[in-house]
Image: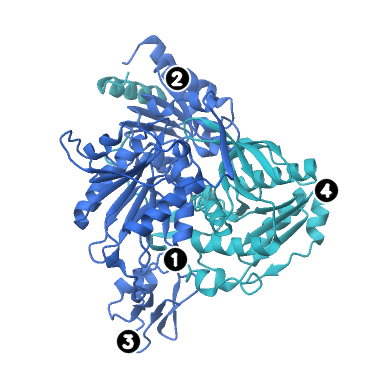
């Protein structure tokens, strides 16, 4: 069983703010982390490998420093890692990103692709399903449980808005996973040593035979027109006084408005 | 670079440097220079007093005039058309009227509510009620849409940013090589270009971004449920209902069973009148105990921010925000929640918002009807005590 897990290095979005004066992102001091959903994707792949034997490859696209998340994946136990890096990849939206990743998947070969449900910086949840279309394989989103897996098929549970569904899918396929699926393992000592020593190959656009007009900014049908701080909302009142006075005022107001 | 500086015209005034939201323009030898941080937003093009910045990308226009009409995807589950479909008809009607074009809905799977789509604003409904369409089959749904779009060429397609919409719509965009914007909270037509301005929270919701797909058609967006308003209901409204030819499933995916009984469904945030929510400021899972007590006293339920869910203090089912539930209760009490937009977009349409936070600069206070700067471990128990005593003075 050949499994590819696509992961992403993201800014820790809980730390990102906008400067209200200049309307720009305040990037200083924002740490980079592995997208949290991807930890669950890696754990799923490692568990499948342990139960069926096989090989797990972690792949990311990004600048050279994105290699950090690949080393983290190796420390958890993946067998190999590939960094897709090329100035031409820069500025890609979900269309160009999923095209680029699909080229890498084709080059590597696979039975199963696992992605996190979404990345916490863009929150689009589009790259997984788009990639499945490029590869002409079925996909199942929001997998919360993997019930059975063999070399040619799997049975999973998909989390929907109002229920969940048990689904059979033939392989090769792509799944995106939610956090309920598993608890990601911490890196092992052996894994950390392997991560330190690992030589991670870097592939550029030519190496994955990506067409230039389909990658990066140039290959992206969407563009950001502008960004702005979220608008403030109507009347606001900060309640003054001791905690007791504050609570009294609040309850009085809520009663007046018919909330209690 | 798709945006370039005309060095002859550039006076080095620096206007572009200050308007660039990405800090991507610098002055080099007294001339503007665009660095790799450029996001092609075009702010500089509009701002340049010398018209010295040229957007080359605008020149690659597709045959956009061939694409006409606004489409919405009307999703159903168990034959019931989702509420978001009617919201899409509301915004879709507005966009279609502005563009002076038709509004069509596409319904996949059996439902007895087809006429409702017309009454809520659709001019046409395309549907198939073949049983294979009753559940989400991503390949079947996307192929059907791809064929319909190739045949009818709509200029805009909107779907709910729901489990169903967000799963299969990306396949449509990938195949058609068109732009797709996820989870929009605002949609407008750009008066100058006619492009759809797609407004959505980005970077975990700490900022808002306007996205455009200037060169590809249709422009596709998924739209956050419960943000758009329904249009006018007119039981007399007439429209055309057109049955489409169903496709055969690929057979690579089979839905075996639908299971409703999960704890996920039991936390009914979306119907709650009062929600007491907790965030990172609670400091741990124990914090939710007092929130639960307060919620019980108020006849409400407990919500949470993503931070609290990510910490594992409370199950995901309670999460309010961009990646959780969108709620609009009569009363929303946010305790120890800083108020990242990712959270705000999920609750800011609540009637009354109360924020309790020890940081007076927390963004949650920007949306709060009533704010209390203080320690929630002091305030919440006091509220509980007073409510139990029935004393307000």
Which residue corresponds to mark 2? Answer: B294
Compute the Cα span from label 4 to label 3: 60 Å
Marks 2 and 4: which is nearer the front?
A: 4
Compute the Cα span from label 1 to label 4: 40 Å
* Residue sitting nearer the eye, B282 or B225: B225
Q: Which quadrant holds the C terminus of chain B?
A: top left
Residue at the spot 44% in from the left edge and 65% down from the top edge: B22
Classify residue A58 by image quadrant.
bottom right
- Judge left or right: residue B217 versus residue A210: left
N-term mark: 1 or 3: 3
Above-or-below relation of B319 to A256: below
Subunit ID for the residue under disc 2:
B
Subunit ID for the residue under disc 3:
B
Residue at the spot 17% in from the left edge and 35% down from the top edge: B234
Which residue corresponds to mark 1? Answer: B22
Q: What tint does the image give chain A?
A: cyan
* Helix, strand or loop under label 2: helix
Residue at the spot 73% in from the left edge and 67% down from the top edge: A201
Q: What tint does the image give chain B?
A: blue
N-term mark: 1 or 2: 1
Above-or-below relation of B106 to A104: above
């Amino acid at each position: 069983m050949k499994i590819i897990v696509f992961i992403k290095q993201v800014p820790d979005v809980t730390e990102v703010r906008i400067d209200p004066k200049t309307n720009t992102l305040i990037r200083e001091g924002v740490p980079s982390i592995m997208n949290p959903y991807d930890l669950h994707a890696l754990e799923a792949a490692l568990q499948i490998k342990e139960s069926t034997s096989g090989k797990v490859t972690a792949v990311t696209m990004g600048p050279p420093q994105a290699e950090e998340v690949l080393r983290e994946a190796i420390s958890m136990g993946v067998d190999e890692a590939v960094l897709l890096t090329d100035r031409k990849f820069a500025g890609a939206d979900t269309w160009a990103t999923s095209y680029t990743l699909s080229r890498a998947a084709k080059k590597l070969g696979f039975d199963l692709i696992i992605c996190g449900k979404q990345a916490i910086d863009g929150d689009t949840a589009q790259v997984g399903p788009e990639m499945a279309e490029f590869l002409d394989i079925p996909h199942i989103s929001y997998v919360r449980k993997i019930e059975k897996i063999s070399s040619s098929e799997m049975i999973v549970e998909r989390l929907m808005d109002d229920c969940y569904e048990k689904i059979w899918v033939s392989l090769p396929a792509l799944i995106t996973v939610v956090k309920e699926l598993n608890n990601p393992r911490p890196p092992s000592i052996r894994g950390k040593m392997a991560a330190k020593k690992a030589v991670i190959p870097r592939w550029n656009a030519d190496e994955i035979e990506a067409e230039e007009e389909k990658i990066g900014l140039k290959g992206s049908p969407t563009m950001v027109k502008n960004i702005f701080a979220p608008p403030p909302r109507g009347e606001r009142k900060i309640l003054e006084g001791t905690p007791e006075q504050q609570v009294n005022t609040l309850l009085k107001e809520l009663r007046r408005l018919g909330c209690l | 670079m798709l945006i370039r500086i005309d060095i002859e015209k550039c006076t080095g005034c620096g206007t572009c440097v200050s308007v660039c939201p990405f800090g991507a323009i610098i002055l080099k030898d007294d001339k503007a220079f665009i660095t790799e941080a450029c996001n092609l937003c075009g702010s500089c093009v509009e701002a340049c007093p010398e018209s010295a910045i040229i957007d080359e990308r605008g020149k690659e226009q597709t045959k956009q005039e061939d694409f006409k009409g606004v489409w919405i995807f009307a999703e159903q589950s168990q034959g019931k058309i989702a509420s978001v479909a009617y919201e899409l008809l509301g915004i879709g009607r507005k966009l279609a009227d502005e563009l002076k074009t038709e509004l069509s809905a596409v319904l996949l799977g059996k439902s007895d509510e087809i006429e409702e789509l017309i009454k809520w604003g659709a001019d046409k409904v395309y549907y198939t009620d073949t049983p294979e369409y009753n559940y989400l089959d991503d390949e079947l749904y996307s192929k059907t849409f791809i064929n319909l779009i190739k045949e009818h060429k709509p200029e805009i397609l909107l779907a709910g940013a729901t489990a169903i919409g967000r799963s299969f719509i990306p396949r449509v965009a990938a195949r058609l090589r068109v732009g797709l914007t996820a989870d929009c909270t605002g949609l407008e037509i750009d008066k100058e270009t006619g492009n759809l301005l797609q407004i959505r929270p980005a970077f975990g919701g700490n900022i808002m971004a306007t996205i455009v797909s200037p060169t590809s058609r249709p422009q596709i967006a998924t739209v956050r449920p419960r943000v758009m308003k329904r249009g006018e209901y007119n039981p007399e409204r007439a429209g055309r209902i057109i049955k489409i030819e169903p496709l055969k499933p690929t057979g690579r995916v089979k839905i075996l069973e639908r299971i409703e009984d999960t704890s996920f469904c039991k936390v009914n945030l979306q119907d709650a009148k009062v929600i007491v929510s907790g965030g990172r400021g609670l400091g741990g899972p124990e914090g939710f105990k007092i929130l639960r007590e307060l919620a019980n006293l108020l006849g409400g339920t407990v919500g949470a921010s993503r931070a609290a869910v990510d910490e594992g203090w409370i199950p995901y089912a309670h999460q309010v925000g961009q990646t959780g539930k969108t709620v609009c209760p009569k009363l929303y009490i946010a305790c120890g929640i800083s108020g990242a937009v990712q959270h705000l977009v999920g609750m800011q349409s609540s009637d009354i918002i109360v924020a309790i936070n020890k940081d007076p600069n927390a963004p949650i206070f920007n949306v709060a009807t009533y704010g209390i700067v203080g320690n929630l471990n002091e305030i919440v128990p006091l509220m509980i005590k007073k409510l139990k005593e029935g004393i307000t003075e």
